[in-house]
Image (tube, rainbow, N blue to C red):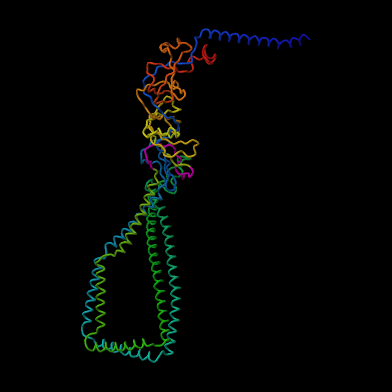
Amino acid sequence: MSAFFRARQLPRRVWLTSIGLVLAVALCALGVFWWRSAAAPARRNFSLIFPHADTLTATVNASGQLEPAQVVTLGFASPGRVDAVLVRVGDRVAAGAALARLDTRELALRVRQAEAQFAQARASYDRVAAGASAAERAAAEAQLQQAEAQQRQTRGSVTDADMRAAEAQLDQAEAQLARLQGGPKPTDLAVAQGQVEQAQLALEAQRSQLSAAKTSAELQVQQASSALTQAQSRYSTALQSWQYVQATGNDPITPEVPDSSRPGKSKPNTLSDGQRQRYYDAYVQAEAGLHSAEQSVQQALVAAENARQAESSGVQTAEQQLAGAQANLDKLRAGADADQLAAARAQVASARANLNRLRGDQRGGALAAAQAGVAQAEANLDRLRAGPSTSDLAAAEAQLESAQAALDLARLALDQATLAAPFAGVVAEVNLRPGEVPSATRAPLVLADLSSYHVDVTVDEIDVSRIAAGQPVTLTLDALPGLALPGAVETISPLASAGATVTSYQVRVTTSAQEPRLRAGMSANADIEVARKPNALVAPRRAVRNDRGRLVVDVPRDQALCLLPADQRPASVDLDQREVATGLSNEQLIEITSGLDDRTCVYVEGIDARLNLLFGPPPGVRR
């Protein structure tokens, strides 16, 4: 029972001890408070300040983020596999410096192919522009001399053969007239009908045969082109292998073999002279095969073009023969009309007159033919002497320009395979690896110009009218306290910012200050100097107040109090109002333009600097 009682008494002792400690702490706190209150002098919540002359600056404050002068994302113009990455993040590069390069082997081959096509077009143009050769002109001159000789011969005496020919012509004309007068014969109609049917069969045969020949020629072109592609591939493989053998002396197929003297190691597979000769023979054979395939393509193209022309001309000739046969049949069936009879009679009269003329002087028809031959030879010689025609030159020039454009495009693609810096700067990001294809979702390379920085800040419509390009700006950074960067206003947006709840405008501030600690994206505060006035009489802005439309300040009636130290001034001061006029102001100071001088102090109500945060203001100071 006694043990239980002692257990019940123990919490009561602890409780009494705790109460005693709390009372002791409270008494100590009251003592300290009384001692500090009695020892501390009365504290004041005002200041007495003399206006003074100073340079007053008005600023507009805004904030933003520090950004480099330029940031550009660079990528390759055409797809490909990365061959080399020449820079790392943080590298400084000059304008035009190479940053990365794609595999250019295929592009180099395309340039060579375009160069060959351009050389071929140049040779064709030069051949056309040069005109006829001396041998061609000499042949044309000889042809003209032959035609002139034939003309002189025709002008000579008429031969017996000429007489017999004229008599036969007259007999034929008379027979034709007699046939027309007698009407068509059944045998003539049968022959004409047979000629029509034969012409139709010939036309169908021509269309079938010539179309098949054209199709076969076009198939030969496709086969020759395919063979050329294979030859080009074999040549490229043989060339690369031979170049590798020349450069290293090793087998391009098996560059390394196990080293028997070093188990687990390998050594270069050096080729013997015979093996090197076999690679060289393969290269020479592939090159010859390439040339042969190119010639085969050219021959196939010529054969295809000849087949197309043969189809066109052969079908046209067959159609003309069919039309002629049909016309002849229709003519026979219709019989001779008055015009045909008149023409036949005229033919008889002409043949008789021709015979009479030959029997008299010279044969006029032969002379006319000879004259025509001379005229034709002269025209051919004049054409050769005049040089190429405008159309031929234009066609050759167009082919040359097309080949030049293809060459320029191939060279441009080769140049664009190397990524170059558009300006001097610092490499900010690299997302390229040799052997990989650049990602379509990430920027291959990012370049930043850190020679200067800018901050885009937002200014409301009230303050933006006070801002102008060129105004000085002081930039401070939250991350670098104590650092102030000089800058200037560069541009002011003419349009309000879209989507803002308050009408505001974007202002760009630039600085060329060089500070190695600066980083893009740092938060920056911009103090834009919108006005400056030197030697202005300034006072604290809170000393000036508006009293029923008047700007006034409070001045002590006893100005001698202003000369006393702050701890000797009374707790309260008798004040008088004085009306003033103000000018420029900022957040702390205001210019006094009239109503006050620098010998009259002003009363500024505020918190006493000696305020104790634990025990409150001193005695005599309002709470």
Image position of 415 with respect to 517: above or below: below
Picture layout, residue 341 above or below residue 112: below
Residue at screen point 42% across, 63% down: 221
Assess whether residue 423 is covered by the magenta stretch. yes
Q: Main secondary structure of the magenta part?
A: loop
What stretch of residues is rendered in magenta?
Answer: 420-441
Residue farthest along the right direction in this orientation: 1
Residue under the point 43% across and 75% down: 206
Residue 252 x, y percent position in the rendering: 42, 48
Q: Where 325 sits versus 278, above or below?
A: below
Using the rendered image of the protein, determine whether residue 321 is visible from the camera's viewpoint.
yes
Q: Residue at x 49, y 37 (%)?
A: 500
Q: Position of residue 539 (x, y in %)?
A: 41, 20
Please say if 583 is above or below 444. Answer: above
Quadrant for the C terminus in the image? top right
Is 211 part of what is drawn in magenta? Answer: no
